[in-house]
Image (spheres, helix red, strand yellow):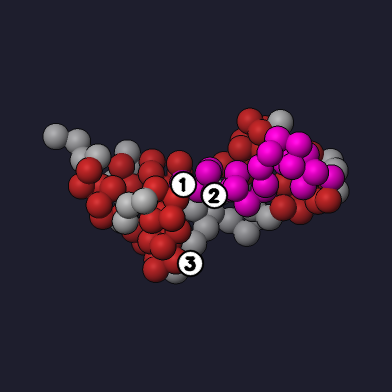
Amino acid sequence: FLAYAHRVMNQHMGNEQLSLDHCAHHFGISAATLKRKFKQHHTSYQQQLDWCRMLAAMSALHLEDKSNEQAAQSIGFNDTTNFRRAFKRWTGLLPSHFRERYACF
């Protein structure tokens, strides 16, 4: 279940169709039923969306060498400040510190 949910989230990363309702539509169930499914797995839609966004942001910053603005936009953030704040919450590091720590030599 979670692997499929991640696949749906990753396919629609960065666009407006990344809502709970849109994800529920992919499963062919209601949003309320989808919430219950996530609860059965001891998680929530938002937690899983944050997980997918975190991994996509880390990849964009490290592997694709995107700027903060490009990384933010690629995962659906319109504001770079909000992206930096979310990235810090997810990883404990600012994007610039993440780049420094995991830079390829």
**Circle 2 residue:** 50
Secondary structure at numbered mark 3: loop
**Circle 1 residue:** 54
Residue 72 within the magenta-colored segment of the rendering = no
Evaluate if marks 2 and 1 touch, with contact meaning CB atoms under 8 Å apart: yes
Label 3, residues with CA under 10 Å away: few <14, some 14-19, many ≥20: some
Region rendered in magenta: 33-54
Q: Is residue 91 left or right of residue 48?
A: left
Label 1, residues with CA under 10 Å away: few <14, some 14-19, many ≥20: some
Residue 91 seen by the camera: yes
Residue 29 in which image quadrant: top right
Label 2, residues with CA under 10 Å away: few <14, some 14-19, many ≥20: some
Residue 26 in which image quadrant: top right
Alpha carbon distance from label 3 to label 1: 16 Å
- Residue type at mark 3: give it: Asn
What's the residue at 71%, 31% (across, down)? Answer: 1
Q: Earlier in the sequence, mark 2 or mark 3?
A: 2
Residue 49 within the magenta-colored segment of the rendering = yes
